[in-house]
Image (cartoon, helix red, strand yellow):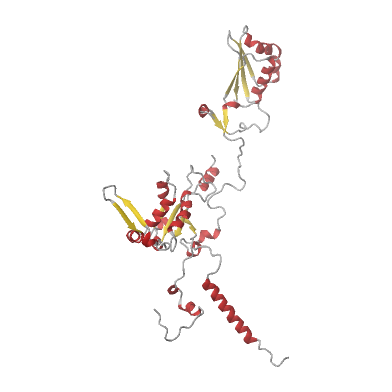
């Protein structure tokens, strides 16, 4: 990306407002065809005007078509859209076939596409079903009730008992065993 | 941005206050732990350019424990800029003058020397004991776990429990205890 892109419009790809609601609304409102009657670079657009323009206008009653002859200037297509944007194409030396395709593109797009730098190639209004992360997600709910600083919460994790604790458990086991021995007296005189 | 989205944004970038009890902790090892919370490295949204650092309150900095003979051997250097202005202060000396300084310097030097370091340090609050101002303490919603278990002193164990500890050896009656 070079510096000239810094002033380019940027954003995410999005549908124009209300495009999917009810009937289809053609976003192209007006198309102005500027051309020269004599110059060679307008040859393609002149043949387009002769053969295809009437059909185009009939097929798209929602689009206002202006034809503007001007002397010795290169031919131009200027499209104006419902959202106020305009798209401008220089069609010097374009063939009739090319111009049909460009007219089709201008009719079907809803804004000047290449003028918008896409920030990302994908976009969603709902990036996460669970909702974005906050510092309080996955927190243990009892933490809300605790008055900080809490000695129990703050103490280091213990992975194994200390020597003292082990000694005390050994001692307790020994005492338990002694009690058990006392409860069940060993039978004497059995061979 | 809708009101709901705004709320989510505030939630995600909410600044959390943590508390850390420095009792019997090595300041130089806990510095690397506290640093992460101050910078915000513990968050999944971390990016060096976004503001996601948290506040950390360190209490009981008077009770820190240094390794080995670091109290005697660790030296803090300062130079006033004038001739003969160099001073070397031992760790125990510095600690007796300002019990928060060792922790502060440990955390400061644990962080990278970027332009952000001084601003990150402003989010650190160190107290020599556990007297934290009430308005600070009511912000706290998390406690950082200590790195080392605090040793249990014999005089802190109540007498009933002390009696239950098994006696391993019986000193002879004429044994001279120090």
Coordinates of residue A133 in the picture (x, y in percent): 56, 48
Image side of residue B39 versus residue B101, left or right = right
Instruction: Tell me which residue sits at (43%, 74%) in the image.
Output: B155
Quadrant in the picture for residue A55: top right
Residue B9: horizontal and vertical position, in percent? 52, 44
Taking the view exactly as shown, the residue that stands out farthest to the left is B83
Q: What is the total number of numbered labels drawn onto the structure image?
A: 0
Q: Is residue A15 above or below residue B12?
A: above
Above or below for A17 versus B165: above
**Which residue, as the protein is rendered here, is positioned at the far right?**
A191
The image position of residue A35, as x and y in percent, is 61, 11
Split into 4 quadrants, where in the image is the C terminus of chain A?
bottom right
Vertical arrangement, residue B36 with respect to residue B147, above or below: above
Q: Residue at x 47, y 55 (%)?
A: B18
Q: Considering depth in this image, is A186 or B87 the residue closer to the camera?
A: B87
Q: Position of residue B14 (x, y in %)?
A: 49, 48
Farthest residue, direction bottom: A189
Relative side of B57 to A110, left or right: left
* Image quadrant where one finds the N terminus of chain A: top right
Which residue appears at 32% of the width and 55% of the height? B88
Left or right, B77 with reference to A113: left
């Amino acid at each position: 990306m070079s510096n000239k892109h810094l002033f380019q419009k940027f954003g995410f790809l999005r549908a124009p407002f209300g495009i999917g609601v009810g009937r289809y609304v053609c976003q192209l409102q007006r198309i102005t065809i500027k051309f020269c009657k004599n110059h060679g670079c307008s040859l393609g657009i002149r043949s387009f005007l002769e053969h295809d323009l009437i059909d185009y206008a009939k097929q798209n009653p929602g689009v206002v078509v202006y034809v503007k002859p001007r002397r010795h200037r290169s031919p131009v297509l200027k499209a104006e859209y419902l959202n106020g944007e305009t798209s401008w194409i220089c069609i010097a030396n374009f063939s009739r076939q090319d111009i049909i395709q460009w007219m089709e593109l201008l009719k079907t797009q809803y804004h000047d596409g290449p003028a918008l730098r896409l920030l990302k190639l994908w976009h969603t209004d709902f990036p996460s079903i669970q909702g974005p992360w906050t510092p309080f997600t996955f927190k243990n709910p009892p933490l809300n009730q605790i008055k900080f600083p809490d000695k129990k919460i703050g103490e280091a994790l213990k992975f194994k008992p200390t020597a003292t604790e082990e000694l005390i458990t050994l001692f307790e086991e020994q005492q338990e065993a002694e009690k058990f021995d006392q409860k069940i007296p060993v039978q004497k005189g059995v061979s | 941005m809708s009101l709901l989205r705004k709320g989510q944004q505030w939630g995600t970038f909410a600044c959390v206050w943590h508390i850390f009890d420095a009792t019997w902790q090595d300041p130089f090892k806990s510095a690397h732990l506290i640093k992460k919370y101050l910078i915000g490295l513990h968050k999944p949204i971390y990016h060096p350019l976004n503001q996601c650092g948290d506040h950390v309150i360190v209490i009981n900095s008077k009770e820190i424990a240094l390794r080995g003979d670091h109290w005697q051997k660790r030296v803090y250097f300062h130079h006033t800029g004038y001739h003969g202005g160099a001073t070397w202060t031992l760790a125990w000396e510095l600690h007796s003058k300002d019990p928060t300084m060792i922790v502060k310097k440990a955390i400061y030097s644990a962080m990278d020397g970027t332009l952000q370091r001084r601003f990150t340090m402003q989010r650190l609050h160190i107290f020599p004991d556990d007297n934290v101002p009430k308005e600070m303490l009511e912000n706290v919603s998390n406690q950082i776990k200590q790195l080392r278990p605090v040793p249990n002193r014999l005089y802190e164990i109540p007498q009933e429990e002390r009696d239950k500890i098994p006696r391993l050896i019986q000193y002879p009656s004429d044994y001279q205890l120090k």
